[in-house]
């Protein structure tokens, strides 16, 4: 399962989800769907923007948990 560390990275930068939504031009609903794993795909554009605004690498952004 794929987990996004968006909230952890936002806290590290002292930024809010609202700030991220405004910069990325994404709705809070869609951002929350990504954060909570309620989406089956994400575009490379969003991955690139998340890394840009959160000042992180893709490895820091995403954790992949092996199925039991």
Image (cartoon, rainbow, N blue to C red):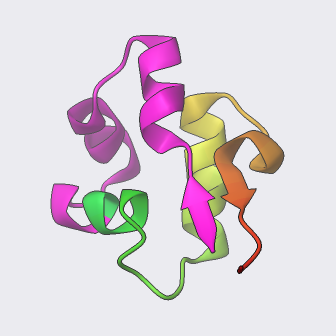
Residue farthest to the front, as pictured = 68
Q: Which residues are magenta?
A: 1-30
As for residue 36 lying within the magenta part, the answer is no
Residue 55 location (% of width, % of height): 66, 28
Q: Residue 8's x, y, as percent?
A: 49, 30
Q: Residue at x 55, y 54 (%)?
A: 4
Image quarter in which the C terminus is found: bottom right
Give left or right: position of 35 versus 58. left
Q: Main structural element of the magenta stretch: helix, strand or loop? A: helix
User: Based on the displayed image, in which of its 4 quarters is residue 48 positioned?
Assistant: bottom right
Q: Against 26, is 7 above or below?
A: above
28 shown above or below 60: below
Residue at the image position 42 percent from the left and 36 percent from the top: 7
Does residue 41 lie above or below 2 as drawn? Answer: below
Q: Quadrant of residue 32?
A: bottom left
The quarter of the image holding the N terminus is bottom right
Residue sitting nearer the eye, 2 or 22: 2
Please tell me which residue is depicted at 71% across the width and 55% down the height of the picture.
Answer: 63
Residue occupying image coordinates x 74% and y 39%: 60
Q: Is residue 12 above or below residue 24?
A: above
| Relative horizontal placement of residue 28, taking residue 21 as reference (left or right) | left
Query: Residue 53: x percent and y percent?
Result: 54, 34
Residue 56 appears left or right of 27: right
The spot of residue 58 in percent (x, y) is: 77, 50
């Amino acid at each position: 399962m794929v987990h996004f560390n968006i909230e952890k990275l936002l806290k590290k930068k002292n930024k809010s989800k609202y700030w991220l939504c405004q910069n990325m031009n994404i709705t809070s609903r869609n951002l929350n769907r990504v954060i909570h794993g309620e989406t089956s795909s994400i575009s490379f554009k969003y991955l690139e923007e998340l890394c840009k605004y959160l000042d992180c690498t893709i490895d820091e952004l995403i954790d992949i948990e092996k199925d039991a």
